[in-house]
Amino acid sequence: MGAHYVPYVPIAILLLLACGMMAAILVINSLIGPKPRSVLHNAPFECGVEPIGSARSRYSVNFYLVGIFFIVFDIEAVFLYPWAVLYRSFLADPSFAFAAVAEMFVFVGILVVGLVYVWKRGALDWT
Amino acid sequence: MGSTLHLVGFALLKITLILLVFVMGVATVLTWLERKYSAFMQDRIGPNRANIGKLRLGGLLHMIADPIKMIFKEDFTPSEASPWLYRLAPFLAVVPPMVIFAVIPFGPGDAFVISNAGIGMLFILALSSLGVYGAVIGAWASNNKYSLLGGLRTSAQMISYEVTIGLNLVGVFMIYESISLQGIIVEQGDVLFGFLPAWGIVLQPVAFILFLFASVAESKRAPFDAPEGDSEIVAGYHLEYSSMKFALFALGEFIEVVGIACIGACVFLGGWQIPWVQHTGGILLTAAEVGIFIAKVFFLIWLQMAIRWTAPRFRYDQVMRLGWKYMLPISLANILLTGVVLYLVKGA
């Protein structure tokens, strides 16, 4: 059994088991718990008054901005992983060692430029 | 056919021992221990009422009484909610933290890890990214204004600190030249200058501190619990959840605590390595190594509890400022410093 999928079989089993267990708990709960009594009982909580309008209205644009920054920085972090694992073998090669360090400064430097830009534009301020 | 059965059977055995016995056991005990420890720190008595006859065991029975109570509670769906998303959210909150344990090595070799897939940390980061969906979908589906506010705060906070976690680990990968947890642990068996164990906390102290705080922020526990903020948005994203659905959110949080402790122990505290003891095999030594790993995990769980009950809650803008303006630049500087130091000592 040298197949490449072998390490993922236990993960799949674990995933199914976890989902099954949690589903079973919820089903048991819905079977043996008391049933809802009235319409008002199921109304969303709003400090004791009847809810005014839907909760799904517009919200601050800052949350979208954070989402975009996350995508930018997290993808760059993922790009760094293969490089990080290989970094010491780059350094072991004398003709390539300095280039490896210089490339690190270039790549992280681009990240820093992006961070400085959003910082100066005030996108990280929440006041 | 025989080898397939063998594979599945062995996997089931390991899943039972690691996930059902160790992780669920510790998470269940934590529901009691967390309250008892907070009571100790705040000079209270804490939970002590659950009993069987005269038997109270210092409130230990609360961890059995609570699930029994939860499962007999009303299974409640708010009238304005999206019913299927509302039911899906507790799953997404509890399943990813459980699946993380598939790649955590509890001891040397392939015997103590559920899956020996080499992707290790990448798998963990992918799953912890999924963790944000549980809270956000729960908040959105509830169709409650407080829930939505909590969900917005949760999503922004979790993804902000995920960037820091991701960048912190780059320094560790650079030093240990591996992305699999077992590979990182094996590399930590070395000794520096004749006396210092080559653990992540020794070689990457800044990354350890940032990792710890960013992980606490990921699990939305105090002092980073602005998404739940009981006094302002009445429990945030799980406000409309009750009975076992609420219990799954709470269970997910405690499993995350155990998961963070396991990852921290593997990456920064040497995993199952015993300092100054060479790994030679043998049943006694292996048992000691598994024991020391579990001891390290308990130490990090204690640290998270102590942080939670020591620090007051940060205001929301403070949380975001800490994440983007302090922790992110520090972790970038940490990568550059690690790269330069590795370049300077490459002959050594």
Image: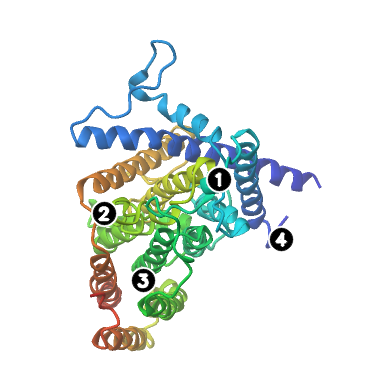
Q: Which residue is mark 3?
A: B167
| Vertical position of residue B57 compared to residue B284: above or below | above
Query: Which mark is in front, 4 or 2?
Result: 2
Residue B120 horizontal/vertical position (percent) = 50, 60
In this view, the mark in front (1 or 2): 1
Q: CA–CA distance between discs 1 and 4?
A: 46 Å
- Mark in front: 2 vs 3: 2
The amino acid marked with disc number 3 is Leu
Left or right: residue B178 compared with residue A1: left
Kindly tell me whether residue B116 is visible in this rendering.
no
Residue at point 51%, 52% (across, down): A43
Under mark 1, the amino acid is: Phe
Can you say whether B300 is above or below B236 in the image? Answer: above
State the residue position of label 4. A3
Q: Amino acid at mark 4?
A: Ala
Please report, as a chain letter, where disc 2 is located: B
Q: Which mark is residue B223?
A: 2
Is label 4 in a helix, a strand or a loop? loop
Answer yes or no: are tags 1 and 2 on the same subunit: yes
- Marks 4, 2 in one chain: no
Q: Residue at x 73, y 55 (%)?
A: A1
**Mark found first going from the N terminus, 3 or 1:** 1
Q: Kindly identify which residue carries mark 1.
A: B76
Separation of residues labelled 2 and 3 (CA atoms): 22 Å
The residues bearing labels 3 and 1 have C-alpha atoms spaced at a distance of 41 Å
Q: Nearer the viewer, mark 3 or mark 4?
A: 3
The quarter of the rendered structure image containing the C terminus of chain B is bottom left
Q: Position of residue B34 (x, y in %)?
A: 33, 38
